[in-house]
Amino acid sequence: MDQNTLMVSGLVLVAAGCVFYALVYPYLSGSIKAERRQRSLTAKGRGPASNERNTDIAARRQKIAESLKELEEKSTRKKAALEDRIAQAGLDWSKSKFYTVSAIIGVICGAGFFVLTANPFYALACLIIGGLGLPNWFINYKRKRRINKFIDEFPNAIDVIIRGVKAGLPLADCLRVIASEAAEPVRSEFRYIVETQSVGMPLGEAIEKLAVRVPVPEANFFALVIGIQQKSGGNLSEALGNLSRVLRDRKKMKAKIKAVSAEAKASASIIASLPFAVGGLVYATAPGYISLLWTNPSGRIVMGVCALWMLIGVLSMRKMINFDM
């Protein structure tokens, strides 16, 4: 048998094997039966029950999309008014009281600086800074501190709702438990929800007010979950369980970011304090040498330019090491 005959025989065997694999192997392996079963299940799934289920899923998705759109519109609203910022800070001040306190602080700062320097322009600048800057800084500080406390305690409040719903309690009773036993400021915020609901406001709208009083994504997520559950139903405990897990993961991520950026913050603090430390040491050793910076007009200009560049550097580093979630 020559070489050509062997090659032809080998090609024929290979072709026969390919035909056997293509035609017979699917029956032996069960692939044909699996495809037939899949087609039968698909045909059954196209019945009226499947259409109703698909319609229900589409309706739920549409409601979720509408709720997300409303949430996005609320998150892009204008800057919070003064009354809202005071309420978010946990203070019971009125608008007139805030302006009165601002005027008193401004007058005290301006008069004190005028007594020290006898310069009316510097006193006027200190009056403006004291009257407009310090009260707003205090409100923002209290507001940020209260919001951070709310974020730390909020997942525990959601866990209380989850356990209460699983035990068979209504959602309103779970909110009352939080309003009476949770830590501040979660307790006062949920007490406000219970009080507004008791005077006739629907529960969904009362919870939506929470996202206005506490403008954080966590409160928006909670209002969104409750709103969707009120409109389309569903397993509330499962949805809130997922939300609690997401909030705790966000909290862990914030702590991780804080730990990673701690070195950069320490470096920024050291760099920002070096000019003042060096200036203080030079003044302690040679006061006549460094006093030219504030006794000479050129020295004042140099100090002003240096202060401006330091401010730009500090703000740039602050922007680099701050992360929004």
Image (tube, rainbow, N blue to C red):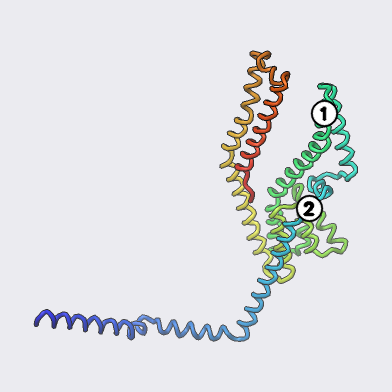
Q: Residues within 10 Å of mark 2 (few under 14, many from 20)?
A: some
Picture coordinates of residue 35 (x, y %)?
Answer: 44, 83
Picture coordinates of residue 294 (x, y %)?
Answer: 72, 21
Which residue does the numbered mark 1 point to in the structure image?
A: 121
Q: How many marks?
A: 2
**Which of marks 2 and 1 precedes in the sequence?**
1
Closest to the observer, 240 or 54: 54
Closest to the observer, 7 or 309: 309
* In the image, farthest residue toward the front: 298
Which residue is drawn at the image coordinates 83% and 47% (left, top)? 82
Q: In the image, is residue 11 above or below residue 70?
A: below
What amino acid is at disc 1? Phe
What amino acid is at disc 2? Arg
Picture coordinates of residue 265 (x, y %)?
Answer: 60, 37
Which residue is drawn at the image coordinates 86% and 61% (left, top)? 198
How far separated are the C-alphas under marks 1 and 2? 40 Å
Closest to the observer, 265 or 230: 265
Which residue does the numbered mark 2 point to in the structure image?
A: 213
Q: Quadrant of residue 143?
A: top right
